[in-house]
Amino acid sequence: MPLIKVASGTVNQTPMAWESNTRNIIGAIREARKQQVSLLCLPELCITGYNCDDYFFAPDLMVQAEKCLLEIVQETSGMIVAVGLPLRHNNSIYNAACLISNKQIAGFYCKQNLANNGIHYEARWFRPWQPGHVESIEINQMFYPIGDVIFDLSTGPIQGGSNGVKVAFEICEDGWVSNRPARRHYERGVDIILNPSASHFAFNKFVTREKLVVDASRTFSCSYIYTNLLGNEAGRAIYDGDAMIASNGELLASSQRFSYEDFLITTAVIDTDYTRLSQVQSKITVAIKDKTWRVPARYDFPEIEPVLPQVPDIEPFEKGGALKEEEFARAVCLALFDYLRKSRSNGFTISLSGGADSCACTALCGLMIRLADESIGMDRLKEKLSYIKEIQSAETEEDLAKALIHNIYQGTENSSTDTLESAQTLAESIGSTFYNININGLVETYKSLIEGQIGRELTWEQDDIALQNIQARVRAPGVWLLTNLSNHLLLSTSNRSEAAVGYATMDGDTAGSISPLAGIDKFYLRQWLRWLETAGCEVKGKHIKIEGLKKVNSLQPTAELRPLAQTQTDEVDLMPYEFLNDLERLSIRDKKSPLESYRNLHVRYKGLYADEQILAWTERFFKLWSRNQWKRERYAPSFHLDDLNLDPRSWCRFPILSGGFERELEELRAYFEGNPVQNGRKRIGF
Ligand SMILES: Nc1ncnc2c1ncn2[C@@H]1O[C@H](COP(=O)(O)OP(=O)(O)OC[C@H]2O[C@@H]([n+]3cccc(C(=O)O)c3)[C@H](O)[C@@H]2O)[C@@H](O)[C@H]1O
Ligand SMILES: Nc1ncnc2c1ncn2[C@@H]1O[C@H](COP(=O)(O)OP(=O)(O)OP(=O)(O)O)[C@@H](O)[C@H]1O
Ligand SMILES: NC(=O)CC[C@H](N)C(=O)O
């Protein structure tokens, strides 16, 4: 059968949520059947969820996963379905994909190249399967082939040497390595490669994935079906629901990303005669002698009509000139929505200062409501949050915002009218509930109690940081009280630039349930806020903007913790955010030493800042970075957005206690003073 209708199915899963995971998978299968799909590929480990962490070791997890698998098998009548799950075999755990053909398990392919860098820790739980090995596994008293297998699906009785449709797998990372299984699949004359993935979101990564899929289909003269998870599965990683089908170097179909649906199907019709022609023309040598890899299975491919040339539907927001802004908005909003419903919380509370960070958090929550409404409509949105009684009679997005987003301004004598106005106008523009209290009395009470005990007055000259921090800390109990009253999540507003240098008060403004901005730098965040005010997300031909951000976009970032006369700004306290960003990239992402970082920065900033200034900021950064690892360990969970992430639990590890770059900074200073140090000893005459 040369023409086959195939599909990629994306599903929004949750670790160990057996009922909903199975329901989503079955929903995807039924939808695919409705669309007359013969072959459906579902994501990596989608039965259990990809992020079960050490619970992958639990024997009961395998028992539950097997139960789900057997339930799914019964739903595959008339179809071929690939579904991912962990398998325990010979006292090892494998990351596997099961191929089911018309209610019969055909066998299991096991991942050969584990993802074990950055956010991934697969080698902690799984063993990589050795290429070329095939064994047998017992499931529910039946034996099935497992390992490096290729499925040979043919019409009629299963024979010894059929010329059926050959289907093989690469599981996610398998497709990203140079010695990928697809090379061997090609030598064995494979028609279709399925790639079930759990590929975490990062800015612009979908472009890399598309290249990978299209190039594989061309290089290996096959059809390549790629599918990813969707949504915020387990808290930190976001999956964009990227799915693609390519054939012989051409992209045939690509999914909508960042959907609020539970599952989505992307279909295309592939032509196996065409990819075989290409294999013949490229003079493929099929390894016919060793056939242990061949798993015969029966499937009666239906005869289907040819289709018009398929042009993949790329979404307008992916083509526009604001891809990063759009991706940031969509990824974080979907992550917030899933976090909300999966944690069964009733909304978000934010201590809204009218500054960029808390305004960005509030704006993201407002945008989340609007994007969810555009994606699935008001009724489905309320149904997905059906446990929140307060929103069930809501008719407008503003009604939803009133219940789901609570803001509180907590001024002191150091707060300005500008920030109050900024907070108020933003809350009004999205319809959130806005409270306004003054916490000066609380700060004064703490101050005088401690002054009474230590027997002296606290002064700005002597006690600057402590007096700043008490204000930030006094804001925490009130906003937590408000949060608890509504069973909300408290959003902690710290961004990545602050996390790098510990510019936040622990248990003060770091208090919170999640930190939606901890993966993004302040320099970019301010640019994004201007974009959201003036351009906004492109959805169905219109632009979703938040014009209530106008005031905050006119303000300089300030903590407003020192007396107003001191005109405190973040950039004076620290260094310019753009510079901080460059320094962070060099030193933390690229692991350049203080000296190398300085030299790079010097090239970029000489003329703009004095050499002494560049040196001082570089020194300050390295000292603050090492001193504040403990704070990064204590941040509320944040979302992974790119390889600049500083979250030690998902990406960037650094010791809490360290030498603090003392020697390295000495070497930098010596270089600066024309007296470099080598091997710990000063070199004379440089
Ligand atoms: N290795 C380690 N492991 C565990 N704990 C460690 C530690 N080193 C210090 N500590 C503890 O850390 C404490 C100091 O940390 P912490 O109390 O947080 O205070 P700290 O980091 O000294 O100061 C907070 C900074 O954040 C700025 N801030 C605060 C609030 C808002 C904003 C804003 O951007 O709006 C900025 C403020 O201007 C100040 O520069 C020490 O008293 C010590 O107890
Ligand atoms: N007057 C205030 N009312 C309510 N919350 C406040 C107030 N001042 C500070 N906060 C809380 O402390 C957080 C930390 O302040 P920070 O200055 O870092 O952020 P911001 O004010 O949102 O942005 P920016 O730094 O751009 O001014 C704020 O995001 C907010 O949650
Ligand atoms: N699950 C995986 O194997 C993920 C690894 C792959 N490199 C990705 O990020 O897409």
Image (tube, rainbow, N blue to C red):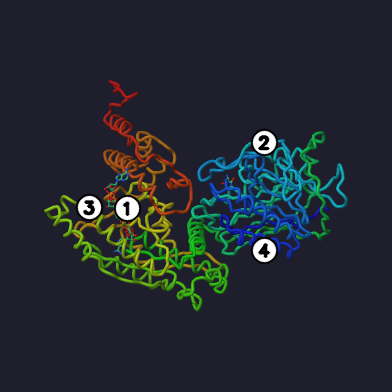
User: Residue beneath label 4, please?
Assistant: 27
Whether ligand 1 has any atom under 8 Å from the Cβ at mark 1 is answered as: yes
Q: Nearer the viewer, residue 426 or 87?
A: 87
User: Residue beneath label 3, please?
Assistant: 466
Q: Position of residue 365 (x, y in %)?
A: 45, 65
User: Residue beneath label 1, please?
Assistant: 506
**Residue farthest to the left, as pictured:** 455
Q: Nearer the viewer, residue 47 or 409?
A: 47
In space, the residues marked 4 and 2 are separated at their CA atoms by: 34 Å
Give the residue drawn at x 49%, y 68%.
369
Give the residue drawn at x 30%, y 21%.
683
User: Residue beneath label 2, please?
Assistant: 130
SS assignment at label 3: helix
SS assignment at label 4: helix
In space, the residues marked 3 and 1 are separated at their CA atoms by: 12 Å
Q: Is 283 positioned to the left or the right of 472 in the image?
A: right
Q: Is 193 positioned to the left or the right of 118 in the image?
A: right
Q: Position of residue 430 (x, y in %)?
A: 42, 71
First in sequence: mark 1 vs mark 2: 2
Q: Residues within 10 Å of mark 1 (few under 14, many from 20)?
A: some
Residue type beneath disc 1: Met
